[in-house]
Every structure is written in C-alpha cells, then in structure tokens.
Image (tube, rainbow, N blue to C red):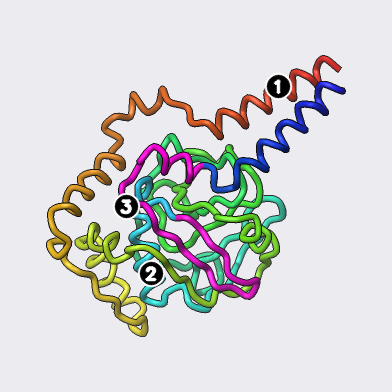
C-alpha cells in the first residue's frame, strides 16, 4: 500500500507539472503542423469554454466545423445529451439528436490522437462515415471510443473543463468564436466547403453567408501547407507512425499497469 501511495503522489505531481494541454504542447514541439494555431471558444450558458483545434489531424472536420460556426449554424443550439462521467453532446439545431447539415463528412482518425484524457472534442456519428454537425465533449478518459470517432479538439485549461463538466441537457451554445487564421483552413478545403454551402443554402436558407477565399490568394507557402495537411491526413508514413508511442498516452498506460501490479502485490 505504501508503494501505491508513493506512486500516486508522483503521478499527481507530474500531472500538475504537465498541463491539460500537454498533448498540444508535445505536438507543437514536434512541428506536426506548421500553421496549427486555431482555437475555438464556445460561448455557453455555463460561460466561455476554450478548445485547441487539430486541423493537422482532421483538416476536413475542422473546416466543416469552422464553416458551420461562421455561418451561424450552431448559434443558440442546445446540449441535447449529457451522460454523467461520459459525455455532453450538442451541435443539432433541432435539439433532438437526429438533426444534421444535410451531408456527411468522412472520418479522420489518427493513431496519435485518442481519448486518453477528459475534455476531448469529437464528432458524434451513427456509424462510419456519418459525421455531420453533432459533436461531443468527453468528461472522462474513454479509450474504448478510440478508432470510432473523429477527434478534432482538446480543452485548454482546467477552468474550461470545469464548465464542460457542469453542462446539462438544455444548456445553450450561444455562438462559437475562433482565433487563428480560419480563413486559411477554409480556403485549403474550398471545393468541399462550396459543396457543403450549396446544401446548407437549400436546407437552412436563413443562415448567414461567409465568403471563402480562393487558395491562390495565399501564395506558394500555403500550397505547400496544403500538401503538408494532405500527407498527414492520408498517413503516407503510417507504418512509421504506428511504431511511435507518444509520451502522455504511454505514461498514463504505464501508470495504470503499475497501479494494477501494486494492487496485486497487496
């Protein structure tokens, strides 16, 4: 028991030292994406909740999310599902859990980003390839969800997570704001965004318009970035990536194994 207590104290110190945005910092240090500095702020009845977004892991998903938010699709939508110690879910303008934008977005699942901690932002779906507009935020590590849902964000601070934890059915998402060059993200996916907007204009004619620039306006540097995103998305180096285990998931899993071993000894 003394060994277990000592181990738990070490874990607590490390978790305090490594913030909830440890994955983001680790990824940034490894230059996973050159322009990955997009943040989303959910303005809710529980206050403002901030997330890092991951266009380098889910470029199409992030573009879809930004486009819907900028067009006002998420404005004044409600949390329609809340499961204690699991998830809160929103993004459906009908508030029923059955609504969507009228089109599907492909899954974008990477092997380096998973549900290893609470506060992950992911797309809800009804099966493979059925992502639309609904999303969920996790309240607890949920690794059993890995490989089934597209993760596209992570909460920034403990105060953000506390607000997520307090959210209940009926809480309102008043609007979603962004920092970073969201126009670049939309331009990188302009052809797809234009197709989505044609459907949105038909299904939700009262949404506001948000123009998308042509990628040529950004010059050669951004064309190279589009190649970078494509390489990450298609995982051309997948075999090499699968051999790489990142620090935080490895640390957490190793700690869990050690705790089980110490309990077995007791």
In terms of depth relative to the viewer, which is nearer, 60 or 202?
60
Quadrant where the N terminus sits is top right
Q: Is residue 55 above or below residue 111?
A: below
Residue with the mark numbered 2: 68
Residue with the mark numbered 1: 258
Residue drawn at point x = 66 percent, y = 68 percent: 169
| Highlighted range, magenta | 23-52
Magenta-span inclusion, residue 129 = no
Residue drawn at point x = 74 percent, y = 23 percent: 260
Q: Secondary structure at mark 3?
A: loop
| Numbered label attached to residue 178 | none
Residue with the mark numbered 3: 35
Q: Is residue 262 above or below residue 38?
A: above
Q: Secondary structure at mark 1?
A: helix
Crowding near the residue tagged with mark 1, few <14, some 14–19, many ≥20 C-alpha atoms within 10 Å: some
Answer left or right for 207 relative to 115. Answer: left
Disc 1 and disc 2: Cα gap in Å? Answer: 44 Å
Q: Nearer the viewer, mark 3 or mark 2?
A: 3
* CB-based contact (under 8 Å), mark 1 and mark 2: no
Disc 3 and disc 1: Cα gap in Å? Answer: 38 Å
Q: Secondary structure at mark 2?
A: helix
Magenta-span inclusion, residue 44 = yes
């Amino acid at each position: 028991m003394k060994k277990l207590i000592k181990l738990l104290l070490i874990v607590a110190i490390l978790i305090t030292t490594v913030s909830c945005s440890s994955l983001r910092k680790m990824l940034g240090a490894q230059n996973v994406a050159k322009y990955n500095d997009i943040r989303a702020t959910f303005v809710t009845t529980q206050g403002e909740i901030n997330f890092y977004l991951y266009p380098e892991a889910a470029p199409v998903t992030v573009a879809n999310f930004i486009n819907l938010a900028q067009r006002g699709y998420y404005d004044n939508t409600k949390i329609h599902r809340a499961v204690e110690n699991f998830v809160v879910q929103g993004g459906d303008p009908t508030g029923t859990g059955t609504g969507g934008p009228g089109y599907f977005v492909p899954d974008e699942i990477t092997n380096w980003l998973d549900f290893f901690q609470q506060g992950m932002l992911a797309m809800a779906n009804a099966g493979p390839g059925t992502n639309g507009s609904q999303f969920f935020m996790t309240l607890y590590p949920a690794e059993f969800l890995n490989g089934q849902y597209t993760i596209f964000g992570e909460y920034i601070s403990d105060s953000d997570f506390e607000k997520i934890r307090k959210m209940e059915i009926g809480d309102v998402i008043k609007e979603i704001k962004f920092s970073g060059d969201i126009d670049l993200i939309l331009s990188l996916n302009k052809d797809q965004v234009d197709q989505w907007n044609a459907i949105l204009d038909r299904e939700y004619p009262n949404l506001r318009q948000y123009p998308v620039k042509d990628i040529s306006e950004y010059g050669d540097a951004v064309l190279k970035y589009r190649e970078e995103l494509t390489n990450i998305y298609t995982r051309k180096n997948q075999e090499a990536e699968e051999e790489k285990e990142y620090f935080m998931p490895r640390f957490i899993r190793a700690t869990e194994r050690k705790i089980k071993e110490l309990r077995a000894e007791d």
